Amino acid sequence: MQHLTIATSSGIVWLMLLCHFGAALIALMAGTVALSVTKGGHLHKRSGLVFTHAMIATGVLAAAISVYEGKSVDGIAALKEPFPLRPPAADQDRIHLLPGC
């Protein structure tokens, strides 16, 4: 099967590709804003949330498109655990991922 493109697709597949592309563009713009403004401010928090939601939508749509193309469903496994953790090395102190832990 050939790769799907917006130009050669139709129906729900075309809509998924278009939404995937649109969500990625929104994520790029929101991420740029979040990195450009003062950390912790209202605009930083708002654009960070928009970035996060747009990236989640991009990933979910990418996994759905991958399944439709008949490819591996490894992308869906990545959605379950987006930040896999490895145990620390024997000579490494505990890593604190959350403040106060």
Image: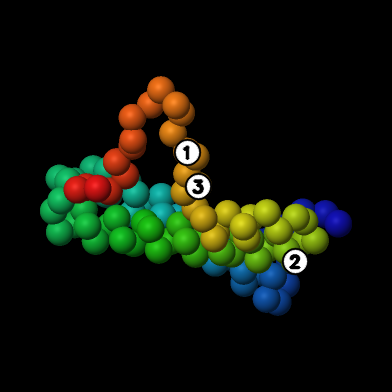
Residue that lies at the very extreme toward the front in this rendered image? 90
Of labels 3 and 2, the one closer to you: 3
Q: For residue 53, what is the image quadrant? A: bottom left
Residue position marked by numbered label 3 in the rendering: 84
CB under 8 Å between callouts 1 and 2?
Answer: no
Residue 34 placed where, x, y %? 27, 49
Q: Distance between the residues labelled 3 and 2?
A: 26 Å
Choose mark 3 or mark 1, whichever is in front.
1
Left or right: residue 68 versus residue 20 is right
- The dot on residue 87 is 1
Q: Which of the two discs, 1 and 2, labels the residue nearer the N terminus?
A: 2
The single residue placed furthest to the bottom in the displayed view is: 11
Disc 3 residue type (three-letter):
Pro
Residue 42: image x %, image y %? 15, 59
Choose the circle earlier in sequence order: 3 or 2. Answer: 2
Residue 90 in view here: yes
Pinpoint residue 50: horizontal percent, then vertical percent: 34, 62
For the residues labelled 1 and 2, the Cα–Cα distance comes to: 35 Å
Is mark 3 in CB contact (under 8 Å) with mark 2?
Answer: no
Helix, strand or loop under label 2: helix
**Please, what is the three-letter code of the amino acid marked with disc 1?**
Pro
